[in-house]
């Protein structure tokens, strides 16, 4: 491998480390939407973008956008990127890797003094994980014109509304509408991301091409029973909300184990009032349901809702069921996928195509432009976990693939190929 490639990839890894210590919490990595930690991450990335001669702006919701102009004015834009927000106690690579590989690809062009017939933008999305307001893909929704202004009144766990958070971050909720991109000027969106699963590692491959991104449904479910004295209320007279939630959680696991292709998770549970000698009166949980087949996902959600009601009725506990968000399974552009595959094969690797169980900004960007995704092998398939790891050699391959992909794309652009 030529030295400069490893140097580029090493720089990406070092920058992941720099961003990796930017956190809201001292002992774990957490960067929620529109927080001081996100501001610090944007400042760091903006500096690197400016060094590559990119025009940098933070948009009305807080997405950081670096633009590398085309050779001539009036050209279409190829969008690249991923997100800089994280889950709670996150790894270093979910999101930042895609932003930093995209930036490194542009740095190569800049170093070579090259401009393309298309403009390139690296978008560092402000909120993909949805940790703060339970609104995944907030950043990409803004570019795609799919932002729901009703979300502005949502409150975080400290009672701060999204509207206030955006203003504090230097954004402008009233200008969000104007960020919508013109689809006729968006050539494509391409995102590099760690695989977050074990397939590439098992197959001994550094990178792979995403075929589809699995649809998902998220719901907030709350069981409301009756708080009472842990010593005096007999077992047969209790309406214990936590026991109902626990039974429901096991039913979620049971259904997902029985149904092929279904994954379902209860990831949050809040119990109240919350004392060792008080019977829980309330238990609120999050439900995440995914399947490649949208109809199967819908059926699973309906079944689980019925199960919750049945558990509640049997235990004398009421059930609140609130759908929070839903996205259908998205197919990546076959033409762009083929272009990525050709770039991988040109480097001497087999081009494996694989589905993504994780959601990505590409889901929403697919409503604006054809999308493609390149996965990078990760260690043990571990993600949403501080132990997330990728190898510098694989990042170097991803960079080379993106470089070749870009050159191929430009040839197609000159031939006026439409990737839709
Ligand atoms: C995004 O990380 C997801 O939950 O799929
Ligand atoms: Mn994630
Ligand atoms: Mn991600």
Image: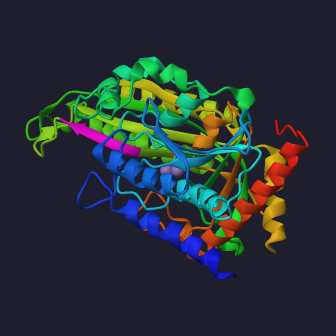
Quarter of the figure that contains the N terminus: bottom right
- Residue 3 coordinates in the image, percent (x, y): 63, 81
Q: Nearer the viewer, residue 187 or 52?
A: 52
Left or right of 160, for residue 120: right
Q: Quadrant of residue 345?
A: bottom right
282 shown above or below 386: above
274 left or right, relative to 164: left
Q: Which of 383/283 is in front?
A: 383
In the image, what residue occupies the spot 70% across and 44% down?
70
23 in the magenta segment: no
Q: Residue furthest right?
A: 415
Is residue 95 among the parts visible in the rendering?
no
- Predominant SS along the magenta part: strand
Residue 36 visible in the shown view: yes
User: Residue 286 location in percent, x, y?
Assistant: 40, 38
Residue at figure coordinates x 54%, y 26% from the top left: 179
Give residue 281's position: percent from left, percent from top: 21, 31
- Whether residue 268 appears in magenta in the rendering, the answer is yes
Question: Measuring 56% from the left and 65% from the top, which residue is drawn there?
Answer: 381
Q: Which residues are magenta?
A: 267-272
**Above or below: residue 399 compared with residue 290:** below
Locate residue 367 relative to residue 175 in the image: left or right. right
Query: Colour mode?
Result: rainbow
């Amino acid at each position: 491998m030529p030295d400069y490639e490893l140097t580029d990839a090493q720089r990406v890894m070092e920058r992941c480390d720099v961003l990796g210590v930017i956190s809201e919490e001292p002992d774990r990595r957490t960067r929620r939407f529109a927080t001081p930690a996100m501001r610090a991450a944007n400042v760091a990335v903006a500096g690197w973008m400016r060094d590559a001669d990119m025009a940098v702006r933070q948009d009305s919701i807080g997405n950081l956008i670096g633009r590398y102009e085309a050779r001539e004015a009036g050209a279409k834009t190829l969008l690249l990127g991923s997100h800089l927000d994280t889950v709670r106690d996150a790894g270093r690579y979910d999101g930042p890797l895609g932003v930093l590989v995209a930036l490194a690809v542009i740095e190569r062009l800049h170093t070579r003094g090259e401009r393309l017939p298309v403009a390139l933008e690296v978008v560092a999305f402000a909120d993909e994980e949805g940790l703060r307001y339970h609104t995944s893909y907030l950043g990409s929704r803004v570019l795609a014109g799919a932002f729901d202004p009703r979300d502005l009144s949502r409150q975080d766990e400290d009672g701060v509304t999204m509207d206030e958070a955006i203003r504090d971050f230097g954004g402008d909720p009233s200008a969000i509408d104007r960020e919508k991109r013109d689809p006729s000027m968006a050539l494509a969106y391409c995102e590099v991301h760690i695989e977050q699963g074990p397939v590439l590692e098992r197959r001994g491959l550094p990178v792979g091409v995403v075929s589809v991104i699995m649809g998902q449904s998220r719901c907030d479910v709350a069981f409301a029973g009756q708080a009472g004295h842990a010593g005096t209320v007999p077992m047969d007279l209790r309406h214990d909300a936590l026991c109902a939630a626990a039974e429901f959680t096991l039913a979620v696991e049971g259904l997902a184990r029985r149904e092929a292709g279904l994954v379902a998770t209860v990831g949050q549970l809040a119990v109240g009032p919350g004392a060792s000698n008080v019977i829980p009166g309330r238990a609120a949980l999050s439900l995440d349901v995914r399947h490649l087949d949208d109809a199967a996902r819908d059926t699973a959600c309906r079944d689980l809702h019925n199960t919750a009601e049945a558990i509640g009725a049997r235990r004398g506990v009421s059930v609140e069921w609130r759908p929070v968000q839903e996205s259908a399974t998205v197919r990546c552009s076959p033409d762009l996928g083929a272009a990525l595959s050709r770039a991988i094969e040109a480097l001497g690797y087999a081009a494996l195509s694989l589905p993504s169980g994780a959601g990505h900004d590409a889901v929403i960007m697919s409503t604006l432009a054809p999308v493609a995704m390149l996965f990078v092998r990760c260690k043990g398939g571990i993600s949403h976990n501080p132990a997330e790891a990728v190898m510098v050699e694989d990042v170097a391959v991803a960079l080379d693939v993106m470089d070749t992909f870009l050159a191929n794309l430009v040839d197609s652009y000159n031939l006026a190929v439409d990737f839709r």
